[in-house]
Amino acid sequence: MTHSITRRAAVAPRALALIAVLALPLGGCDTHKILEVTDPDILTPGSISGPDALPTVRRAALGEFALAYGGSGADGSGGTEGVIMYSGLLGDEWINSETFPTRIEIDRRNTQITNGTMGNWFRTLSRARVRTEFAARGYEDFSPDLTAETGYAEMLALAGFTYLFFAENWCSGIPFSRANPDGSTTFGQPLTMAQMLDTALARLGAALTAATNAGDADLADLARVGQGRARLDQGNFTAAATAVAAVPTGFAYLVTYSLNSARQNNGVVNANSFNERYSVADVEAGVGLPYRSAGDPRLSFVRTGGGTDVGFDRATPQWDQLRYLGRDASIPLASGLEARLIEAEAAMNTGGLGASNTYLPFLNAVRSAPPAYITANGLAIPVMADLTDPGTPAARQDQLFRERAFWLWLTGHRLSDMRRLLRQYSRAENTVFPTGPYFKQNLQYDGTDVNLPVPFDEENNPNFTQCADRLP
């Protein structure tokens, strides 16, 4: 039986103004202390008069989350980018194919705290966190029966994923503040990467409980995959595998997009295929993965114009991904496939000399029956031959991370995996991240970024100066 679920991402009324992002206190999921937004265009606790307003609040939160995850077609200059675009640009999935110096700076791994493009990304993810936690608070305050409300579990889970995105893609030491009903701000203390992951796990744990109480197996699986992902980020492989063990391979939670408005468009398609600001990478700077040259059926792309198409900069070869074809294509956020990949990595790390007998079955099981939800276009991925044991720990790691990269291509996982290769597997930075000459404008990969900094706007918080560290 296939367990798949699609949550329609509706457009929100307006974008929130930046509120130096938020966080609930650690030590549990205390959604009663959720950020209360005071912008008059935003639904506030006082404007929610009862349970009838909750579906509207949920739809607004879904819209903000979809924007933060996959981006949109709004705002010009290639659209609003989400996690998938900017993590892939700093990682090895995308190269810049236009002229904006702020994006080139990020692609070259030298992001300044004054970078306006990066600041917009930070605010977009911050708004998603605000909306999802605000919605969860609304359900708590106004739902007559939380055990009958699947929206409650969904909002808690998506709030957990926003913390995951911050932890995986940004530096350690992000301040999360809280806006008060009277318009004042309670400035938060910076949270380390470990604390952000703990916060994500608290939200996801509460979501699992709520989904179980409501009898929603799909949302329970969404929370489980999120827990497994967070445990993987912690390096707690046994707990990661335990978290996802019950998730069926056929499960998928899809973030959906539509043609109703530019703001509801799939931003991956928009920025790459239509506006040609990003091009599919291939062995970036000699160390990235061979997304184009591998000849792998999981990686679909094309260069139009008889193989002569160039990007917006009129110079960079333009390669368009084909995993998501239309501006209304949905994007997997969590899946049973990811659960099997988590189990494979856990087995590789706990299997000792018998690792080939423990991790390969998980990888080969999905190669022999590729899930249909991997692409949004109905493109069938054929059955692939079984992998064999390459024989050494380093080669096994390479094999597993390549499988993760190809299965999870353009879903916002790769930058975190590259960081984990440094942090958990002791790889040298110059064997994972690009260095040396940049591919255009006679520039260099002249930075050492493995994550994004916090924008300088956040220095208005008296508790914050800048990132605690930029370590992987």
Image (cartoon, grey):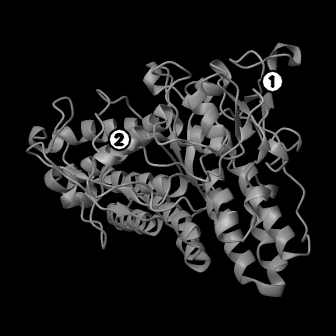
Mark 2, residues whose alpha carbon is within 10 Å: few (<14), some, or many (≥20)?
A: few
Answer above or below: position of 126 versus 357.
Answer: above
Residue drawn at 26 percent across, 39 percent down: 57
Answer above or below: position of 125 versus 213.
Answer: above
Is the C terminus in the top left, top right, bottom left or bottom right quadrant?
Answer: bottom right
Residue drawn at 37 percent across, 53 percent down: 159
Which residue lies under the disc numbered 1?
317
Please identify the quarter of the rendering in which residue 331 is found.
Answer: top right
Mark closer to the chain start, 2 or 1: 1
Tell me if 311 is positioned left or right of 305 in this view: left
Residue drawn at 75 percent across, 83 percent down: 351
Which residue lies under the disc numbered 2?
457
Tag on residue 370? none
Percent from the top left, x then y, of residue 422? Answer: 68, 65
Q: Nearer the viewer, residue 188 or 215?
A: 188
Q: How many marks?
A: 2
Q: Evaluate whether residue 113 shows in this view.
A: yes
Task: Name the kind of residue labelled 2 in the image.
Answer: Asp
The single residue placed furthest to the bottom in the displayed view is 353
